[in-house]
Image (spheres, rainbow, N blue to C red):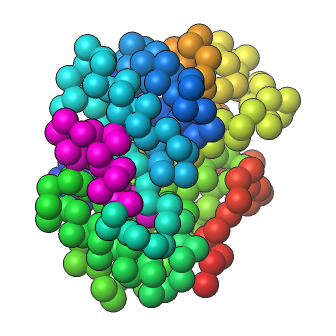
Amino acid sequence: MPTTLSPDTTIALSSGKEIPQLGFGVYLSAPEVAERTVTSALEAGYRHIDSAQWYFNEAEVGSAIKSSKVDRSSVFLTTKLGHADKIVERLNESVGKIDPEHGYVDLFLIHAPTAGPEKRKEQWKALEDLVEQGKAKAIGVSNYGVKHLQEMEKYAKIAPAVNQIELHPWCQQPDIVAYCQSHNIALEAYSPMVQAKKTSDPTLLKIAEETGKSWAQVLIRWSLQRGFIPLPKSDTKVRIVSNRDVFDFELSREQMEALNALDKDEHVCLNPTGCP
């Protein structure tokens, strides 16, 4: 990957939308801190915020955006459908929480394939309707395995623009990655810093020392150079700033190969890609 990566780097989605490659996640950001956290992220320069119904902080994310000096059109907002009942009602509720003023989200995902084949189809059809209504600019999925994506080919009028899955050097999911890349489905990487469970890994620490960067910055940079869309998360302002400071260095081919060699299919989050 050339050194042309910058804080303004975007990836073109199949929907025609441009998504900022470096995102910011708010998983486990409690409602009472989420608004402050998103405000700090916007002040640090992030322009891509990722929330979900199951995070219970959509309204706080929306409030932070509304009160920010950053124009809404400059912020890429994502949320995720987490339920298989009252689907249309829940979709509209999320849009209302995140952007009551303008009435849309930039990306709406199905959070997991756990609802089963028929409900997955129903969820997707509802998302397609949301696009037609202008309430979602792009739609996609999260935690989908190859079989779930292949299943969608039979009924999806709009192809998924994104698949958000766990991705880091110890969990590289090559089969899903290859499928998505061959079908123009952008890959978002959640838990890109492995939830700080690999801070003592010798390979990671060696590369951090070589680059003069933190272990977290190395992992985020690895994700960017792989062409993924990492979603680092923190509620601590100094780390929010640090996690974005990844554009003044480049991992060498040898360093990337060393990190790529760490794959153990080791998940730190529940992996629902095996759902029927």
Nearest the viewer among 252 and 131 is 131
On the image, which quarter does residue 200 sit in? top right
Q: Position of residue 113 (x, y in %)?
A: 53, 72
- For residue 103, side relative to residue 206 (left or right): left
- For residue 236, side relative to residue 88 (left or right): right
- Does the rendering let one see residue 154? yes
Q: Which residues are magenta?
A: 90-110
- For residue 104, side relative to residue 58 (left or right): left
How many marks overall? 0
Nearest the viewer among 132 and 74 is 132
- Does the rendering let one see residue 252? no
Tell whether position 96 is magenta.
Answer: yes
Q: Position of residue 37 (x, y in %)?
A: 51, 22
Q: Position of residue 206 (x, y in %)?
A: 77, 25
Q: Quadrant of the C terminus?
A: bottom right
From the viewer's perspective, is residue 54 above or below residue 151?
Answer: above
**Residue at figure coordinates x 60%, y 33% from the top left:** 30
